[in-house]
Structures are given as C-alpha cells and as structure tokens.
Image (cartoon, rainbow, N blue to C red):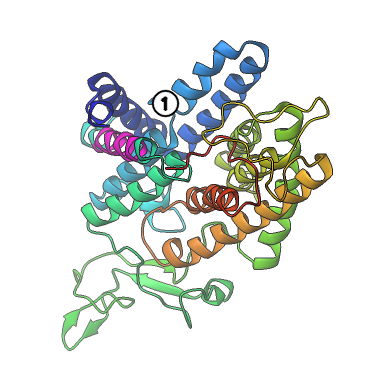
C-alpha cells in the first residue's frame, strides 16, 4: 500500500489532473470523463488491450472524478473564498462548478493539491479492498476535506422546518448577504446575524439551494431512477460493460453545462444499475462475469437469471441510488456553500449495496466491486 501511495509518477500526474480540472472547471472536466469512458469501453469491446483508455485516462490522473473533478471543486471553493469569482451565479459562487477557473496560479495549485489528495483517497480504498466505488468515495471525502480546510461549514445553516425541507426554495424565500442593517449599532448579515462591513454590497441568495432545481422532488427523482436504471442495466447486459452507461450519462451533461434547461443527471443511477444487472445476469451462452474480485456463488438467490430479472434488479437499484442521492443533497448540499457531490455519494451507496447483497447471498458476484 505504501508503495502505491508514494508512487511519484502517479502523484505528479494527479497534481496535473487536479490543476487541469480546475482550469477547465469541474463539470467540463467530468464531461470529458464521460467521453473518455465511452471511447475506452467502445475500444475495449473490439480490443481488450484498449482498457487502458478507461482505466488510466478516464479513471486515472487525467480525468478521474476524484482527481480532476474533485480538484476543480476544491479550487472553485478556494477561488470563491478569495473573492476571485463574481459571475452572478444564483447560488454561492463556490457551487458554480460549470465555471472554468482559467490560469490563476494559486487556484490551479489548490486544484493540483486536491488532485493528489484524491489519488491518495482512491488508492487507500482500493488497496484496502473497501466494498464500494473507490473513485466516488474519493470525490465525497475530498469535498468534506475542502470544506474543513477552507473554513466552510460541513452542513451549513438549516433555514427550513428541518434539514430535508425544500419548501423555502419553492416559496423563493431569500436571504440577504452583506446587508447594512444594524443589530445593536453593529452592521450584521441579516441571514447569519454576524458582523459585516457596513459598506458591503447587498446580494440576495436563496435560503435553501437544491442541487438541481428541476430534479429534487421525491416522486420525480424516483421515476428518473426507474427509467435510467432500466437503461443503465440494459446497456450493461447487452455490452457486458458496467461503465458504458455511466459514460453516456456523464457525457450527456455537456448540454447541462451549455445551459440547456432541465437536463437530468443520471450517472449515479446508470452505474449502480448496470453493475447490479451484470451481477445477476447470465447470457444465453452461459458465460458469467469474468475478472470479478470475488468468486461466483452459484448458490446465490439470484444466480443465473435472464435479462428480464436483470433489468428489474437494475431498476430497483437505480431507484434506490437516485433517492439516496436526493437525501444526501438535502443534508449536505442544499444548506452549505460549496459543492458536495450527491451523485458520488449515491454511487458509493449503490455499489456498497451490490457488495452487501453479495455477502447476504442474494447476488452471485460483485462484478468489479472489491470486497476486503
């Protein structure tokens, strides 16, 4: 493990990946991850030796979400803290992950530093054989790290009836940042009750900021999980790739980055769904998933199922992952000031669920998910 953590070439490359992710912007960098996964998985179907495109480029230092995306997210939080960002973004500037940060050296250095942190986090999970997606966990832990290191609150101030309440957003309730109203003769922030400069400009901001304004209602999220879960599972079982559907979902976010309204985010649905479907599916030729980190358990409850059952399994896991992502965003995104990624958390939960169902004797394998 220590050799992997101290691999100088990988550390240098991770710094470059994190800095490049900051320069491009977190969301554009992640979109490149999606395109590279599509290219890698398509090439691997023709030539298995082309797997390096997915493994070393899409999920390696250049575009691994734990390195380039997470590094970019941390750099965005840093740039916002330093006052470098004034884009008119509706939420806190530190949540503006579609914004390219350019070439400012200190911003790119922060991105690079968190790129290295992301590499270490992924390596630790992988070397320990933790039963979840190590890259997704790296994204989540890196986000909490940048909040702690840069002085942001882990959750933020809850302004609704409870931490899950999105109704202040629906009522368009605003808070004023930099208000010169006084409290006992001292200028205060109206929302926080903290001292602020009397001459600070007023800026309104929503009291509660859902991760996606068009994708937060429980029934809508569940229905999206159902549809994307089926499609992720289908792509998985017809191609044998657990990652191609993820790549398609990630690449589709180019439209969201370009400002097309109501584009759904689905990569946290398609990846767990495809993995779960492949865990139970046995193709007509009788082959099973090869290269899995655990032995195939032919006595498992769902061993040897056909496409129909695999699609239903993918549907169920897709809905669960979608709903968990929404729960996570209500707790950690909606009230905070920086981007903590709900899809990454949902992928961690969804892949852990696949591993858990294997241990419980329901799934016959974990496909690609390690198990201690």
Which residue is rendered at x = 48% and y = 64% of the image? 209
Q: Is residue 73 above or below residue 199?
A: above
Q: The magenta stretch spans which residues?
A: 110-124
Percent x, y of residue 295: 57, 35
Identify the image quadrant of the N terminus. Answer: top left
Secondary structure type for disc 1? loop
* Residue 315 part of the magenta-drawn span: no
Residue 214 visible at all = no
Q: Residue 267 occupies which quadrant of the picture?
A: top right
Pick out the residue farthest to the left. 185
- Density class for disc 1 (Cα within 10 Å; few <14, some 14-19, many ≥20) is many
Instruction: Give x and y (percent) for residue 255.
Output: 62, 38
Residue sitting at x 81%, y 39%: 307
Percent coordinates x, y for residue 278 in the rendering = 68, 37
- Return the residue nearer the eye: 19 or 360: 360
Is residue 56 visible in the rendered image? The answer is: yes
The answer to if 118 sits in the magenta stretch is yes
For the stretch drawn in magenta, the main secondary structure is helix
Q: Which residue is mark 1?
A: 60
């Amino acid at each position: 493990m220590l050799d992997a953590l101290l691999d100088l070439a990988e550390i240098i490359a991770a710094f470059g990946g994190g800095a490049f992710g900051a320069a491009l912007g977190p969301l554009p960098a992640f979109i490149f991850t999606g395109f590279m996964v599509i290219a890698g998985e398509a090439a691997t179907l023709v030539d298995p030796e082309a797997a390096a495109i997915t493994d070393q480029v899409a999920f390696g230092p250049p575009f691994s979400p734990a390195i380039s995306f997470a590094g970019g997210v941390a750099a965005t939080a840093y740039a916002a803290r330093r006052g470098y960002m004034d884009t008119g973004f509706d939420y806190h500037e530190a949540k503006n992950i579609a914004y390219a940060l350019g070439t400012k050296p200190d911003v790119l250095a922060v991105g690079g530093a968190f790129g290295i942190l992301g590499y270490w986090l992924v390596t630790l999970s992988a070397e320990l054989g933790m039963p979840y997606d190590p890259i997704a966990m790296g994204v989540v832990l890196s986000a909490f790290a940048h909040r702690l290191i840069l002085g942001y609150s882990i959750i933020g101030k809850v302004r609704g009836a409870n931490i899950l309440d999105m109704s202040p957003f629906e009522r368009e309730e605003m808070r004023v940042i930099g208000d010169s109203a006084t409290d006992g003769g001292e200028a205060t922030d109206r929302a926080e009750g903290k001292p602020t400069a009397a001459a600070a400009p007023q800026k309104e901001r929503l009291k509660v900021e859902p991760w996606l304004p068009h994708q937060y209602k429980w029934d809508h999220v569940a229905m999206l999980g159902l549809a994307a879960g089926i499609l992720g599972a289908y792509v998985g079982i017809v191609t044998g790739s657990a990652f191609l559907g993820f790549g398609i979902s990630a690449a589709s976010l180019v439209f969201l980055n370009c400002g097309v309204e109501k584009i759904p985010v689905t990569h946290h649905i398609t990846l767990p769904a495809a993995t779960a479907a492949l865990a139970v599916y046995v193709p007509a030729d009788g082959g099973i998933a090869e290269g899995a980190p655990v032995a195939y358990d032919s006595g498992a409850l769902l061993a040897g199922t056909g496409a129909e059952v695999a699609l239903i399994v993918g549907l169920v896991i897709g809905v669960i992952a979608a709903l968990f992502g929404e729960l996570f965003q209500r707790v950690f995104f909606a009230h905070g000031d920086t981007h903590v990624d709900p899809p990454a958390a949902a992928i961690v939960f969804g892949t852990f669920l696949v591993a858990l169902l294997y241990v419980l004797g329901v799934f016959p394998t974990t496909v690609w998910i390690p198990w201690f």
